[in-house]
Image (spheres, grey):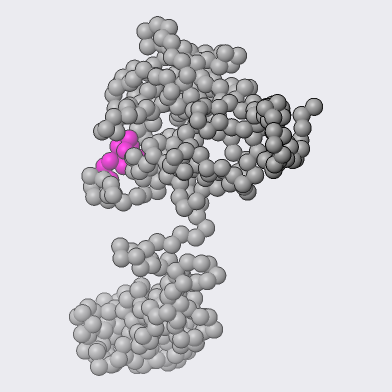
Amino acid sequence: MAESKEQLRTRFETIRDENRTAANTAERIGNAFLAILPYLGEFLRKDQPETLEYLLTLLNGAVIGNSRQITLNPDGSITCGSIYVEGSAIFEELVINKQSVNEGDQVFSNRGIVEIVDQTSSNQFRLTFRKEYENDRISFKENDCLKCKINNLDTEGTDFTSWFRVLSVDYENNTADVILYPDNEVPGGHNYAPIEGAVVARWGNPVETDRQQMFYLSSTDGIFAFLQGVTKPIINDEGSNVTAYIGLPNDIPAIQKLIRDGMLQRNKPILYAKTAVVENLITVKHDGSPDYIQREWDSWDNEKQYIMGFDSTEERYVQDNCWHGGSLWRCIVPQARIGVEPSLTNTDWACIRSGGLVLDIESTEGDWYNGDKNFTTILVAMLVHGDLIIADEYIESVVWTRESGDAAADEAWNINQAKTEQTLNLTVTYDLDHPELSDIPVGMPYGSKCGFRCTVSGDFSNIPITNIYDIT
């Protein structure tokens, strides 16, 4: 049985401290050396390569390599300059510090890594896919349209793309028989054979509709797209494959026309989508200032706060419009004064749609009269613009004329009785002996009409404003 390290220490200290003559014999010293032989295998050699058959426990960690970039820390962490994995890497948790950068194209779809390429016939290949773990199986299916982009690994950074369709799949052997698409059916007009090491992704499927969609992200083309209805390498020219597209879908002729017409710019990203449902859409002008959403109200409310600014409830920039006095008014200040109605003299509002100049005629005694009784009324003509009454100083002339159907009598009335003020006193006297006393022709049958036309002219663009008032 081997002595313990403490026993060996005691033996060697005894030999060291012995002062009797001839006490330390060769046999005594030799036995001491033989006692340490069982422990020689526990120490690592420093002068030659060494193999350790048992578990090595380094309680305070270790530093590996001359660069000292690999450190095994006592807390269980590893610090190193880079990691190269030939197979697969499985992480319980992955934390990325600062940023993560992906080059090239990222396709979110079914994938596989080509391990062996065997050409079976012209433009046909059998691809054996790598197993990243023992029970790994490819998820490709028959008729899948597959794409793989390969870097040439040259100083110019060139690459090429292979396109092929799946003819059959052998899941037991993790292989797929594929056929290349013709050159005229692939983007760029030239197809390439697959190579070993290529990462293959499903692009679409001409038969199974649930395998015709995927996400596609390209840092080289500057696009992010969700594609649906993909049946072949080239997406449809009319753009029916594109459900959402951030960037410029170069394969759609309509988009290219917008670029040629100057409506779109290649260096400005766009969102191209078939359907968009947006709860809150804030648009801005070329300088970044907000574009206001016009919010229209049926009528002005004297207790309501109208704004031109950000509405915290709707979470968008709005500009209130409301109807008042027959005109549409737009709030042009951050907050309009509550209770102060919109008008041409109210600087909180701008009239953006008006009924124009309106000549309103009203009768003080109504519109009907009894033909056998005397009837007197006053017609008042009022010229308004929106809710603003046009002042007399802008009116140059007012002419009243009668239209009863009796041309001769009307002409006589117009010459003798026509008034030039904005009010007209009308008298109806049912007296056959003195018809000149009546402004309405005496003896008009029941249901007849007699109109009085008012024509106002002034310096409001020199346009005569006309209205006619009928008395029945």
Q: Which residue lies furthest to the top in this view?
A: 121
Q: Which residue lies furthest to the right in this view?
A: 1
The answer to which quarter of the image holds residue 230 is top left
Can the viewer see residue 325? no
Q: Give the residue at x 43% y 62%.
A: 282
Q: Give the residue at x 41% y 9%.
A: 119
Q: Is residue 462 magenta?
A: no
Name the spot of residue 247 as percent of width and height, x first. 36, 45
Residue closer to the observer: 233 or 5: 5
* 282 vs 89: above or below: below
Name the spot of residue 102 as percent of width and height, x first. 42, 41
Name the spot of residue 300 as percent of width and height, x first. 49, 79
Can the viewer see residue 281? yes
* 200 vs 9: above or below: above
Quarter of the N terminus within the rendering? top right
Name the spot of residue 257 as percent of width and height, x first. 26, 42
Q: Is 90 situated left or right of 425 in this image?
A: right
**Dominant secondary structure of the residues highlighted in magenta in the image:** helix
Quarter of the C terminus within the rendering? bottom left
Q: What stretch is highlighted in magenta?
A: 249-258
Q: Is residue 252 magenta?
A: yes
Q: Which residue lies furthest to the front in this view?
A: 21
